[in-house]
Image (cartoon, rainbow, N blue to C red):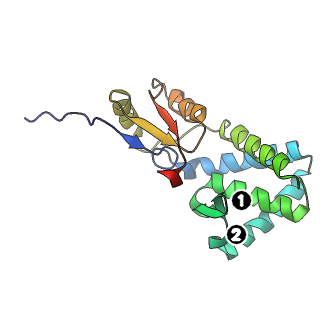
């Protein structure tokens, strides 16, 4: 029987590749809206109504909206619930004429994203935990657009030792 050597390097994305982001979507979106309303001092009903209008806008012109790096869309809004939430929040705030200062808005949306992410438990794809153990036993790393602490928390949630190396890198630069 031939012995298979573990690979020398493993590089993988995390959210959506190793996790089932659709199973996290409802809880994340609910937490996101609650945090946004609380921290923007805009009534939840007002945020919800603007959010639904923004969602219709994105559904009618899906290629027009997404996660931007400068002026370029690097991931469509419909790629996952996290990108969609960020896009919808921006459109909702625009329609309400709220939080127009770019720095203040960016800080609010970043804080909302991280607070919401921390409120949900990850759901890993079948075989992902076994794969992460393999990564830990080799010189592999996980490349993520997320904060490395959030990814480590997801791995630790399932009792795995932390992934030895997490690299934060924009996918558009790889």
Q: Position of residue 151 (x, y in %)?
A: 55, 35
Q: Which residue is mark 2?
A: 58
Dividing the picture into quadrants, the one containing residue 146 is: top right
* Labels 1 and 2: the sequence-earlier one: 2
Q: Relative to residue 93, is residue 158 depicted above or below?
A: above
Question: Looking at the image, which is closer to me, 26 or 96?
Answer: 96
Q: Is residue 151 left or right of residue 130?
A: right
Residues at discs 1 and 2 in contact (Cβ within 8 Å):
yes
Identity of the residue drawn at 45% across and 44% down? 18
Secondary structure of the residue carrying tag 1 is helix
Q: Give the residue at mark 1.
A: 87
**How many discs mark residues in the rendered view?**
2
Q: Quadrant of the N terminus?
A: top left
Which residue of the protein is positioned furthest toward the bottom in this rendering?
A: 60
5 sits left or right of 95 in the view: left
- Where is residue 118? Give x, y as percent: 66, 35
Question: Is there any visible trace of residue 76 in the rendered image?
Answer: no
């Amino acid at each position: 029987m031939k012995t298979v050597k573990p690979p020398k390097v493993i590089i993988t994305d995390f959210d959506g590749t190793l996790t089932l982001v659709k199973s996290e979507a409802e809880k994340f979106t609910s937490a996101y809206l609650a945090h946004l309303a609380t921290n923007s001092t805009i009534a939840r009903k007002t945020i919800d109504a603007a959010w639904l209008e923004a969602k219709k806008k994105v559904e009618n012109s899906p290629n027009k909206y997404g996660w931007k790096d400068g002026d370029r869309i690097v991931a469509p809004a419909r790629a996952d619930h996290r990108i969609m939430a960020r896009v919808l929040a921006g459109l909702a705030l625009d329609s309400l004429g709220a939080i127009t200062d770019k720095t203040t808005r960016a800080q609010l949306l970043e804080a909302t994203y991280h607070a919401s992410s921390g409120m949900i438990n990850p759901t890993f794809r079948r075989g992902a935990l076994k794969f992460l153990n393999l990564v830990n036993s080799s010189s592999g790393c996980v490349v993520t657009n997320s904060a490395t602490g959030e990814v480590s928390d997801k791995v630790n949630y399932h009792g795995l030792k932390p992934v030895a190396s997490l690299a934060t890198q924009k996918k558009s630069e790889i």
